[in-house]
Amino acid sequence: MRFVDEVKILIRSGNGGRGCLSFRREKFIPRGGPDGGDGGDGGNVLICADSQLSTLLDYRYQSQYQAGNGQPGKGKNMHGANGESLCLRVPVGTLVYNAVTDELLADLTDPDQPVRLACGGQGGRGNARFASSTNRAPRHTQPGLPGEELRLRLELKLLADVGLVGLPNAGKSTLIRAISAARPKVADYPFTTLVPNLGVVSYDGHKCFVVADIPGLIAGASEGQGLGTRFLRHIERTDLFLHLLDLSLADDPDRLLDDFHLINTELGRHDPALLEKPQLVVLTKNDITEVRQRVQAARLQLEALGYPVFCICALTREGLDPLIRAIADRLEHSRELAPCPTTPHPAQP
């Protein structure tokens, strides 16, 4: 299954049913009068977030959706049936835009709370509605009103507490595999991660936080280089960044700082608000001898810039428990964490 995070669709609400032209005709009841019923209302188009979904893939293959039309009225003052409403289900974190005006119509951060996007057309009135003292036998009815048509752009922004950022092969996927049940692909070449991944990290028995891993960033990512530009929006909603640095490639202190500032520069170019989020710096691959020799100097450099620094080896789980505790403490200061939800993982390609 492919991970799809942006689609365009066309929706139409249902048309209202026409009113009925009818006169009562029964034995022994002359001039029974008008009895045409009203038409039914057209169905609405709703949209609702579903916590069991993780991709907009279904909307890639079907781009047009229409609610049911209202049924016409009938004789004997019978009201036509209302059209069936249509509810589109999307992943939590989906934003709904008017594709023509680019207006934000809905931000679906809460599951199972439907939002009406298009209202169905009202049913027309039958001729019984037009009877009066001066017009005992009206032959006038109303057609139903047409439904609404909208072109929409659906954009998915994953909801996570913590975002993992860093250069390709910094160890982000290995870390999320070690601390959660997520199983992204891990390999010794750049851009192994092609889609965002979500992992739920449990601690203290009943609490948890959600971590988002996005494809590695490179210079120019905010301008379309590499894969980062497409997926940077998935960390806009996070409360905390883990900035991963690979010391095995930083053979001198200046290169380490260059790599560190490169990522922050791309984050700031994408959205300056991202630089205001707190960051924990994580030095990875501590099982390598060269890395162990460089840790102390790197720690001093980064702490001098005001960042908390952690050194880990995700493969051996060295340093993971203090890191998880530090993340939890930061998050608990900003909000009370709820019991662990069932959070889906985006499908791998």
Image (cartoon, rainbow, N blue to C red):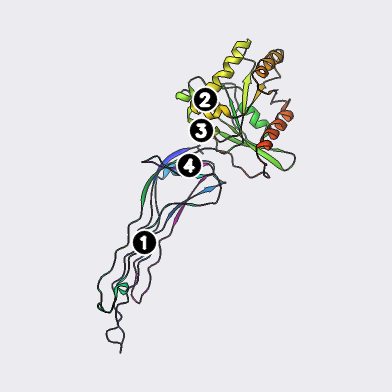
CA separation, marks 1 and 3? 40 Å
CA separation, marks 3 and 2? 12 Å
Going by the numbered disc 1, the residue's amino acid type is Gln
Magenta part of the chain: 72-100
Circle on res. 278: none
Write the residue at 64% across / 45% down: 341
Q: Is residue 227 visible?
A: no
Residue assigned mark 1: 122
Does the segment drawn in magenta span residue 94? yes
Residue assigned mark 2: 268
Going by the numbered disc 2, the residue's amino acid type is Gly
CA separation, marks 4 and 2? 22 Å
Residue assigned mark 4: 95
Circle on res. 233: 3
- Indicate which disc, 1 or 3, sits on the residue closer to the N terminus: 1
Q: Quadrant of residue 299?
A: top right
Residue 264, percent from left and from top:
55, 22
Going by the numbered disc 3, the residue's amino acid type is Arg
- Indicate which disc, 3 or 2, sits on the residue closer to the N terminus: 3
Going by the numbered disc 4, the residue's amino acid type is Leu
As helix, strand or loop, the secondary structure at mark 1 comes to loop
